[in-house]
Image (cartoon, rainbow, N blue to C red):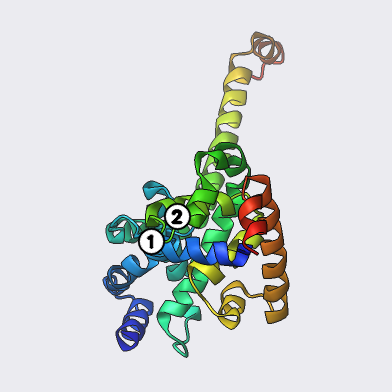
Amino acid sequence: MSEHEILQKLAGAARWDMPPAINVADEVMRSIAGARRRSFDPAVGYFAAATSIAAAIVGAVAVELWINWQDPLLDMVSSMTGMN
Amino acid sequence: MDDLDLCDVQASLRGDGDAFGRIVRRHQSQLSTRMWRFTRDRQVLEELVQEVFVECYTHLASFKGTGAFSHWVNAIATRVGYRFWKRQKKAAEKTINLEEWDLPALARQERPDPQLAADALHAMLSKLPPRDRLVLTLMYLDELPLAQVARQTGWSLTMVKVQAHRARKKLRALMQKHGMSDLLETQE
């Protein structure tokens, strides 16, 4: 018996082994809907990233202004120079 | 069925949300039989069938309707199955143990039990590199002629013949290693 014949024999029998019944229609449609949503994600992602960066810059400027406003040395300098 | 498929493909491309669902319901049984060659696990089977349909959907515009829709789906199924084997090659080498099957006894039986034969064949082929496994699966389990194996894999006809020859040679060595030497030699 050659390996070809052994393969033929086992495959001939294995072909009758049926898979379990499955129903994936709903899952597939959900995956497709998810994929459609994800295709919009890059635009949403860029917008979110730009917003985050802008918010971070505004926050940093605000903190800097707050610190400068509260800095006693600056208060003293401004009172000495009469700029207050 | 081909006309129905073509209508639903065109409807789906036009944005009909139900059309692709009809395609899935029509082909899932045939496709699960095909993907059952790639795994013996029900959950993995469901995942693979889903993956094939999602891939079909994303490439739907490339279906021109010149051949049968099922052939087009099967070519995608072959690619998905092959990719799966490549991903799980190392895991299969470690977890599948050929000693669990009495391969010589199974091969000697007049009519081997289908499930046992499928399990044993799956285990045996899992020891081969994915390319060898693919060519033997398409040729023996799916009984595809060489030209169709070439179409499904995207290989040339010569390449399919060479791959099949090498795969059988490796399988023979594997059989000899797992106690089938007597069977191979005495009955030759």
Residue A84 makes an appearance in the image: no
Residue B149: horizontal and vertical position, in percent? 58, 76
Whether discs 1 and 2 lie on one chain: the answer is no
CB atoms of marks 1 and 2 within 8 Å: no
Characterize the local packing of mark 1: few (<14), some (14-19) or many (20 or more) Cα atoms within 10 angstroms.
some
Q: Secondary structure at mark 1?
A: helix
In the image, taking residue B168 as reference, residue A17 lies left or right, namely: left
Q: Which quadrant of the rendered structure holds the C terminus of chain A?
A: top right
Return the residue at label 1.
Answer: A32
Q: Residue at x 41, y 57 (%)?
A: B112
Residue B47: horizontal and vertical position, in percent? 41, 53
Q: Residue furthest front?
A: B186
Q: Amino acid at mark 1?
A: Ile
Residue A17 makes an appearance in the image: yes
Q: Residue at x 45, y 66 (%)?
A: A12
Q: Is residue A73 above or below residue B120?
A: above
Residue B180: horizontal and vertical position, in percent? 62, 50
Q: Secondary structure at mark 2?
A: helix
What is the number of callouts on the image?
2
Residue B1: horizontal and vertical position, in percent? 30, 84
Q: Amino acid at mark 2?
A: Ala
Return the residue at label 2.
Answer: B117
Q: Residue at x 34, y 60 (%)?
A: A18
Foreground label between 1 and 2: 2
Front in this rendered view, residue B114 or B87: B114
Q: Which chain letter matches label 2? A: B
In the image, taking residue B111 as reference, residue A11 lies left or right, namely: right
Q: Residue at x 28, y 58 (%)?
A: A23
